[in-house]
Amino acid sequence: MELLERFAQGDAEAFETLFRQFQSAVYGWIVRIVRNREVAEDLTVETFWRIHRTHARFNPAGSFGGWARRIATNLALDSLRRKHHETDLPDDLAQPASPDPAGQQETRKQIQAAFRQLPAKLHIVAILALVEEEPYAEIAKALGISEVAVRVRVYRATRALRRSLKEQGVET
Amino acid sequence: MSEQNDRGFRELLKKGMGPAESELKRDLWPQMLRRMDERSIPVPWFDWALVAVVATCLLLFPKAIPVLLYHL
């Protein structure tokens, strides 16, 4: 029997095999959204926990990777919503190899703050489209929305980011 | 907005956000197993005993069902 069929029927070994095959991809997708290693690891485990719990709903003819990415995206979006209530900066955003001049460091903080001011559904699209340069079709699939909706959200996010950065005196 | 301006804006955002550490540094399977264990904590025996007692009572005294529902 195929791996995906065995998984859909609740086979524990099939689940472990899929976990090992897809954990890196799921983590890689989540960390690019939440930009925090620990949070991304926790959300990866949570994604697979949900996958495990709802195995019977999985259609073995479909794409496991696509299904996992959709669940991961929803969890990352929830995480961004929670994060928007916090005021501290993400603690493990990768720092440049050489020390930044004070001005650049300040600009980085202002840009990160501008992202946090966005509503979560614009934040996630802005990160994926503007920073990670993911194709709109991929973003649309992961969020379960149309490409047109992605385009509209990117437009709105860009406008909001430009406005916010302009208010903070950052040259855009 | 010109294409060049747009490109410059994206570069600024990328620089501001920094690269994400997209490589997974450790196997998460042990963490997954812990999570699965946490979520499958067995129901204590006395809970099952209580359910059995209530079910028996309801079978023996079906007229008690409305009373039970009223108190729930």
Image (cartoon, helix red, strand yellow):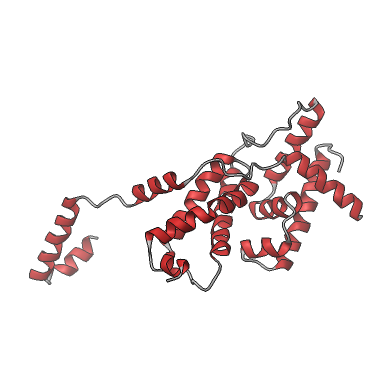
Say which residue appears at 80% left-offset and 26% top-offset.
Answer: A101
> Compared with residue B68, is residue A27 higher up or lower down, i.e. above or below?
above
* A17 relative to B18 in the view: left or right: left
Residue B57 sits in which quadrant? bottom left
Position of residue A152 measured from the top left corner of the image (x, y, whole percent): 75, 62
> Compared with residue B61, is residue A43 higher up or lower down, i.e. above or below?
above
> Compared with residue A107, is residue B43 higher up or lower down, i.e. above or below?
below
Is residue A61 shown to the viewer in this render? yes
Position of residue A127 measured from the top left corner of the image (x, y, whole percent): 70, 50
Which residue occupies the extreme left position in the image? B60
Say which residue appears at 90% left-offset and 55% top-offset.
Answer: B3
Say which residue appears at 17% left-offset and 65% top-offset.
Answer: B67
* B31 relative to A160 in the view: left or right: left
> Compared with residue A55, is residue A104 higher up or lower down, i.e. above or below?
above
Quadrant of image for the N terminus of chain A: bottom left
Position of residue A85 measured from the top left corner of the image (x, y, whole percent): 59, 42
In the image shown, does A168 or A55 lie closer to the viewer? A55
Say which residue appears at 46% left-offset and 59% top-offset.
Answer: A51
Residue B30 sits in which quadrant? top left
Position of residue B36 measured from the top left corner of the image (x, y, whole percent): 37, 51
Residue A125 sits in which quadrant? bottom right
Which residue occupies the extreme bottom position in the image? A61
Which residue occupies the extreme front position in the image? A1
In the image shown, does A138 or A21 lie closer to the viewer? A21
* B14 relative to B29 in the view: left or right: right
Is residue B1 shown to the viewer in this render? no
In the image shown, does A72 or B54 lie closer to the viewer? A72
Quadrant of image for the C terminus of chain A: top right
